[in-house]
Amino acid sequence: MTIENTAWQLEDFVDSLVVELDKTRETLAVKAVNKPLSYSVKEVSLDLQTFPSYDGDQVRFVTAQPGQEGASKITIQLNSITDQQVRATTKMPGARTDIPIGRIPVDKATKKTLRKLGVQSVDDLEHLKQRNVDLDQVGDGDIDYTTLNKQIQKSRRDQAPPVVTAVSLGLDEDRRPCLLVQGTNLSVNPAFPPVAALNQRVVEVVSRSNEELQLRLEHDLEADNELVVALDEFSVVKVNVKAR
């Protein structure tokens, strides 16, 4: 049965090849943790018989079928890599605190674009952000990073949800009464200022950290009090506070 070949672009082919090579390199790096590599990958040559075409804007290629004549040859040469180079150039995957891009609920096109750019986890994105890298400039400009950031924060919340362990009375830096809300993962999104309400009245969040929130008290507590804190767009905690 004859299979009709699909036209492809060199950029897409090379991007796919690089993704596969990166996966292989990461696999070798993990293996080297328990068993040092005793070999190196020498030069690999890949010859493609293709028919190129140019439409005035893009160059596309169709792979030649067996027996077809008149095709042009494209040669891709891969150089050698040693075990030392693998260790020096490869980030060890699988950190417990990292979130793979595959676990973030975004569309396949976004995941594919990020993989082409070498971004495989949330830590990779954070590293590029710290280096002031604008992915829109090096990508296709088709990623909605606002939506992506929200999905990342939601994934982090799902992986380590906020937990309130205690609520007590205290004093802030100005020696004014406040509620101390203690727990874990209470600062799920540094870019989102928490909003708190005590008995349906908004109260000021004086300070926040992963372990504690300070809420300024502008009125006396009742016998039973309902405290609601929105930590970000996806995380809302509700606590019943009893005054003694």
Image (tube, rainbow, N blue to C red):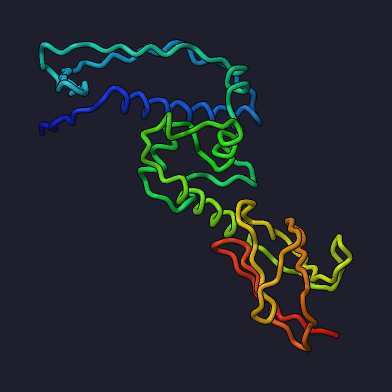
| Depicted 152 relative to depicted 232: above or below | above
Q: Residue at x 60, y 69 (%)?
A: 236
Does 179 sit left or right of 159 as displayed?
A: right
Does 4 sit left or right of 176 as displayed?
A: left
Tally the marks: 0
State the image coordinates of residue 188 (x, y, percent, origin top left): 64, 56
Q: Nearer the viewer, residue 156 or 138?
A: 138
Q: Nearer the viewer, residue 218 or 221?
A: 218
To which quarter of the image does residue 209 belong?
A: bottom right
Q: Residue at x 54, y 55 (%)?
A: 155
| Depicted 156 relative to depicted 202: above or below | above
| Depicted 22 relative to depicted 235: above or below | above
State the image coordinates of residue 19 (x, y, percent, origin top left): 42, 30
Q: Residue furthest right?
A: 175
* Quadrant housing the N terminus: top left
To which quarter of the image does residue 175 belong?
A: bottom right
| Depicted 227 relative to depicted 1: above or below | below
State the image coordinates of residue 234 (x, y, percent, origin top left): 55, 63
State the image coordinates of residue 239 (x, y, percent, origin top left): 69, 77
Q: Nearer the viewer, residue 14 or 214?
A: 214
Q: Residue at x 45, y 31 (%)?
A: 117
* Quadrant housing the C terminus: bottom right
Q: Residue at x 37, y 46 (%)?
A: 108
To which quarter of the image does residue 44 belong?
A: top left
